[in-house]
Image (cartoon, helix red, strand yellow):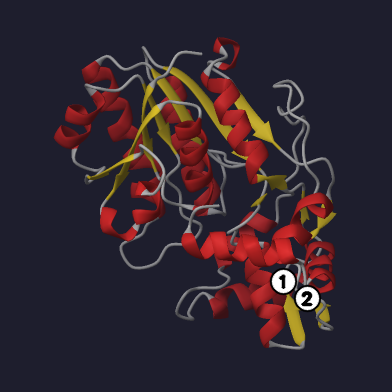
Amino acid sequence: MKALRICVLGGTGFIGSHLVHRLDRLGHSVTVLTRRPERHREFRIGSSVRLLAVNPYDDNALQTLFSDTDCVINLVGILNQAGKSRFQPAHVDLPRNIVKAMRETGVSRLLHMSALNADVNETHSLYLKSRGQGEDLVHQAPGLNVTSFRPSVVFGPGDSFFNRFAGLLNMAPVLPLACPGARFAPVFVGDVVEAFVRALGDNSTIGRRLELCGPKTYTLKQLVEYTAQVIERKALIIGLPDFASRIQGRLLGLVPGKPFTIDNYYSLKKDSVCSESALTGLGITAHSVEAVVPAYLGKRSTRAQYYRYRTLARRS
């Protein structure tokens, strides 16, 4: 595949940082949009990645940037609404702006991050509904060659899933867990990145909505228990019944940082499991939780210490 000029929105987040470094190593010319480039100097070390201070909601700014672009990758997404961060602007308005700017400048290739269970007809979870609206919007845009990605929970060095539960388990010996029976098929961030890379050079993925899942399915409680095992932490994990899970969502949604919200509760009511993972069709062998997590989360592992260092440096 020839070197492309790629513009990435959401490129400084967990998945974005992994993908941007991979694209850079493959020889592509990568531009990352961020409002505060000075906070992400790690991209300047040993790479040719270009960071630009651009407001992605500025139509004129996007059009100017896209005029020198072959492909756009949109990774922008939020799990909770807080302050100025709202689902509608992040998941619907921004994709609409991207589509408009691409059509104005003649750029046709778009890789769009969505979420498993995203559905415009969702009646409870605003997160899943807004994700569905954005996904439908980009696929229905005339003149664009779109591939969207619908992953289960994504894990890997720097993730906010296993690392978050590890932090909670280290703080408290007892953990009341909402929706303990919710099912996931966690997918390794490296496999997600590989799916983006392969789709970039595979025209057969155009128009498709690719579900991405790992090789095994677990309940939420099983994953939290496994986290405790890896960090060698003895903890009592109490699975809450449905009514208590709902109450926890409403109460913790009022806490600064919103560790769990009523919208998270509604999202967890739908199993995050693929009907058929697209990884196999892309020629990717999915990595299991057990093969990866101990390497960056394990308490005594030398490699875990190395991954933690890289995460702090934001270069993993």
Residue in the foreground of this view, choosing between 181 and 52: 52
Q: Residue 225 carries which label?
A: none
Q: Residues within 10 Å of mark 2 (few under 14, many from 20)?
A: some
Say whether residue 265 is visible.
Answer: no
Question: In x, y percent, where is residue 17?
Answer: 48, 47
Q: Is residue 155 left or right of residue 35?
A: right
Residue at the (48%, 44%) spot, across then down: 16
Residue 29 position in % (x across, y down): 36, 28
Which residue ends up furthest to the front in the rendered image? 46
Q: Name the residue under label 1.
A: 178
- Are the residues at dot 2 and dot 1 in contact (C-beta closer than 8 Å)? yes
Disc 2 marks which residue? 240
The amino acid sitting under disc 2 is: Leu
Q: Is mark 1 on a helix, strand or loop?
A: loop
Q: Residue at x 38, y 20 (%)?
A: 141
Q: What residue type is labelled 1?
A: Ala
Q: Which residue is drawn at 46% across and 23% down?
A: 139
